[in-house]
Image: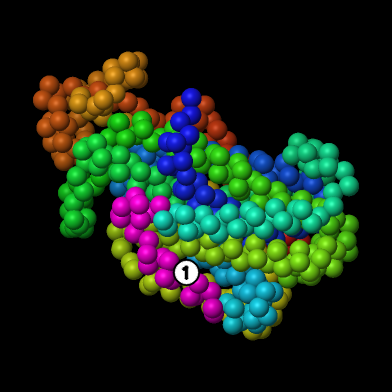
Amino acid sequence: MVNFRKLIQFIGPGLLISCAYIDPGNYSTSMSAGGQFGYIHLFIIFLSNLFAVILQCLCIKLGTVTGLDLAENCRKHLPRWLNLTVYVLAETCIIFTDLAEVVGSAIALYIIFGIPLNIGVFITVLDVLVILLAYNPDGSLKQIRKFEIFVSAFVVLTFISFTILLSKVTIPDKTKVFEGFLPTKEVFGSKQSIYLALGIVGATVMPHSLYLGSNLVKPRLKEFDIQNENYTPTESDPNETNEVFEWNHLYKPSFDAINYCLHYSYLELILSLCTIAVFINSAILIVAGSTLAGKPDAEDADLITIYDLLCDYISKGAGFVFALAMLFSSIAAGIICTMSGALVAEGGLHWKMNPLVRRLITRTLAIIPCMFMSLLMGREGIASILNLSQVILSLMLPFLAAPLLYFTSDKKIMRVEVNNTSTTSSSDIDGISQSITERERVSETSALLQRRKSADHSGIIEVKDFSNSLLMNVLGVSTWLCISSMNIYLIVQFIRGEDVHF
């Protein structure tokens, strides 16, 4: 049975993760798909969300069991050269993701307030600086929940905007909408339909969300252990001078905390993605399918053209609501992108940076190409930049998801000691615990050995294996192979000069 009072305490991280799946890249791709092919790509939206759920569940498991996010696990377990390579790829993704948020915010400001695109691009540097300065991942859960509520408010406003927009459109045959969620050969009936299907997947499963998802679970774990006196927080983090000292002294969730949080973290994430993210992305496509399908300007429409079309075929109010939704989601996605960038730098390199400095660096790097293209090519340049960002993110995703699959399937990384003083009964761990002999412990680091000896003088420790089951490994690897194949095909066709619209 689900304890709904307990579930309410976990609401927040899933909504923040949803921000990564409703950025301007999704608007452009889903609108284009709906305008050209009606509702048939709703199945691809559902499939993309399924991929996202699988990968994000792995992120939750990794962060919950190890107490470290994906970037920290890369730094701890990968060779230095490989960790640096992953770090560079992740930072590249952060910059290009932020670039998409810049484009979305600038276009929304142009539509709503008439601010020129080049000036709107510059204004986006300042949009969430104050809020980011208020976020402290090591602060109390009460402070973090206030931040989650603030960002979630933008997600809810986006949700409300598309609810209003859906109420303004007329759908002659509603059964076709429901049929769109079922697989059909029409999705693969033409090259352009395939391109759009692959583009929806690439625009939905975002690399930076993997780092964020594995980190957002940590505050509730730590709060549980503090309340139950399993952990006493220190005033400062360990110094970078000694790797063994650092990893040995970082917070690691207790077995009880993992049992308390893991399944509710899964549930909150799945509910958030399967309601908020799926609804918004589906609503984008349904609005386009019901109003723009078959219209001559829908095929090559950029975001501004889509606004004009909505004004022409529905009402100016509908176009305005669309622009508001894009502004809300761009702000929320921009906050999440900057948070992810900080996690990548701090976890991958132990490079702590003031959020203000981080925001200035990433947004400056994103603004330079946007300013250049908007000044030289105007709207076409901005659309090209958005297109380029989706290409880069599609190319990087397989490389950044691979470590996640590796870590969560590794039994040594994903095992947790069952504390003898734990309140968990022995029946809860019956059949899943194993003995670790003195000889097995010799292969581990001396710091880990000392901690285990002090916890159990008998030389035998019971542990629970949280590594992926065979089914989860199959789902994870299949998802990775499917996304990789789709993205590689899309990139190859793009390089070959095909008219690919993301």
What residue is shown at x 53% (from left), y 61% (from top)?
Answer: 332
What residue is shown at x 57% (from left), y 55% (from top)?
Answer: 155
Residue 144 placement: quadrant: bottom left
Span shown in magenta = 122-145
Residue 311 in the magenta stretch? The answer is: no
x, y percent for residue 400? 48, 50
Residue 130 in the magenta stretch? The answer is: yes
x, y percent for residue 466? 38, 30
Numbered label tally: 1
> Is residue 424 visible to us here?
yes
Disc 1 residue type?
A: Val
Circle 1 residues within 10 Å: few <14, some 14–19, many ≥20: some
Near-viewer residue (321 or 245)? 321
Colouring scheme applied when the structure was drawn? rainbow
What residue is shown at x 63% (from left), y 53% (from top)?
Answer: 159
Horizontal side, residue 310 vs residue 460: left or right: right
Q: Main secondary structure of the magenta part?
A: helix
x, y percent for residue 431? 35, 15
Residue 310 placement: quadrant: bottom right
Residue 87 placement: quadrant: bottom left
x, y percent for residue 45? 68, 45
Horizontal side, residue 137 vs residue 367: left or right: left
Horizontal side, residue 313 vs residue 415: left or right: right
What residue is shown at x 26% (from left), y 25% (from top)?
Answer: 423
Q: Secondary structure at mark 1?
A: loop
> Is residue 502 visible to us here?
no
Quadrant (top left, top right, bottom left, bottom right) of the C terminus: bottom right
Residue at label 1?
128
